[in-house]
Amino acid sequence: MKEKAKILDQATIQRCLMRLAHEILEKNKGTENLCLIGIRNRGAYLARRLADCITRIEAVGVPVGILDITLYRDDLTLIAAQPIVHKTEIDFDIADQNIVLVDDVLYTGRTVRAALDALVDFGRPKSTQLAVLVDRGHRELPIRADYVGKNIPTAAQETVEVRLLETDGKDEVVIVQKD
Amino acid sequence: MVWTKKDLLGLEDLTKEEIELIISTAESFKDISRRAIKKVPALRGKTAVNLFYEPSTRTRVSFEIAAKRLSADVINIMTETSSVKKGETLIDTGTNIQALKTDVIIVRHNCSGAALMLARHVDISVVNAGDGWHEHPTQALLDILTLKERLGRIQGLNVAIVGDIAHSRVARSNIWGLTKLGARVTVCAPKMLIPVAIEQMGVRATDDIDDALKHADAVNVLRMQFERDQQAAFPSRIEYFKQFGITSDRVQKAKKDIVVMHPGPLNRGVEISSEVADGSNSVILEQVTNGIAVRMAVLFLVAQARDRNKRESKDKKP
């Protein structure tokens, strides 16, 4: 694994999130019936940060939930490593809400597909939207994001690593060359 | 920590880390049973078979619910109404169930070692739901999960196990599990029902109930099976209740928040009084609820491991 380029630093990540928060508020015309649900692991922290941005703009809080999609993955029988099942924490009713799913990187779209399946088991939202910090392309399913922090065209031999203060001790997005 | 075993036969074979993995996986599974839609697709397309050579309601139903909440299909085989009545052996029954392209056999049998023998003769997963006097691993795991929820830890706890230790698979699995996780275990029973050399399992033995309860953070009350052959070991139900029964008096003398557990079904007025069984120290129904999450975790882990092992052996072939 070799780092090729740093795409976003702490300040740009923060600006991206602030812009995404504005876009979410603009499209949903405010915070009424608006909920954020982050996909574990890093999506959960990004959802929390987006909620903070929204509070700074509108001075109101929005509910934030955490979704663990392990049990809904279509490659559950294929992954080599032990899948660790974590809790899903959604302590509000999602029925008739406008849900914004939040994840760090949008790639094949399979995680989002699993998240949509998982979400349906909690109720029927009025709408479901998708916000990602990075869209790196290479979709394998007909899925797109409503809000994108940064589009990063990548090669298949590259991966995009999102590092966050909460999980990695620093905020940055880098492109890594696979060996 | 990677779970690699296709079977769960007992807690004796497991490491501390493996037990902790089952418990933490079960903790994550608990909330599925609280949702409006109590189902996830993790074992979709898998078939689990309940093969029970002994009567059981709660364990069988608990396994069935656990498998169904993971979207597996479940078949129940009660041996009284099956070919076992015609003399089919356990191994033949097992290989036939495997030939039906199923994925997990959950087996309860009156012979110790039955689950192990079955596991050696089939490639599909085997989960021990109680074999003779040997082990009942999922019961001990749900006891451990319940204790951990109530008291926040297992390490350093004093746990008393009271009742027919000699003939109890629940006691044996609890002893293995609790001692591996760092609890101190005291077993308490009439002398005739304490196996010789039980101390070699790392526990203290006593026939004095007040001594057993004195420092206990929790007491696991075993069912006295007077319908079986315990008449010889202990002649009278009333006498047993007087000497070993968990009563309000005894609970009041113990630690204030002592946790009272029982694997069920209850013999009220034999090993436990109704006041205690229904009182605030009792976690008996929480145990039942936790049984689902624990069994979901076990089914999930063994099915995953089997798939992974199968794939790896396929990769190795040229």
Image (cartoon, rainbow, N blue to C red):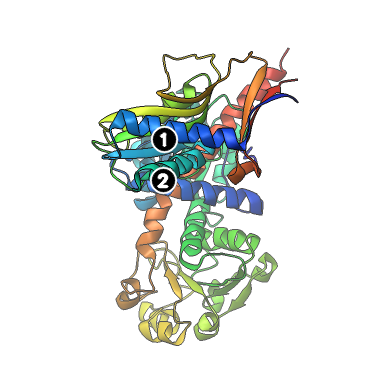
Dividing the picture into quarters, in which one does residue B290 lie?
bottom left
N-term mark: 1 or 2: 1
Identity, as a three-letter code, of the amino acid under mark 2: Arg
Residue at 37 percent of width and 75 percent of height: B272
Q: Which mark is drawn over residue A21? A: 1
The spot of residue B285 in percent (x, y) is: 35, 61
Which residue: 59% across, 15% down? Answer: A153
Establish if B214 lies above or below A63.
below
Gap between marks 1 and 2, in whole Å? 10 Å
Q: Nearer the viewer, residue B9 or B68?
A: B68
Q: Considering the image in quadrants, where does the N terminus of chain B appear?
A: top right
Image quadrant of residue A136? top right
- Few, some or many C-alpha atoms within 10 Å of disc 2 (few <14, some 14-19, many ≥20)? few
Mark 2, residue position: A56
Q: Is residue B71 visible?
A: no
Q: Which sits in the foreground, B2 or B117?
A: B2
Task: Identify the secondary structure beneath mark 2.
Answer: helix
State whether residue B22 appears in this view. Answer: yes
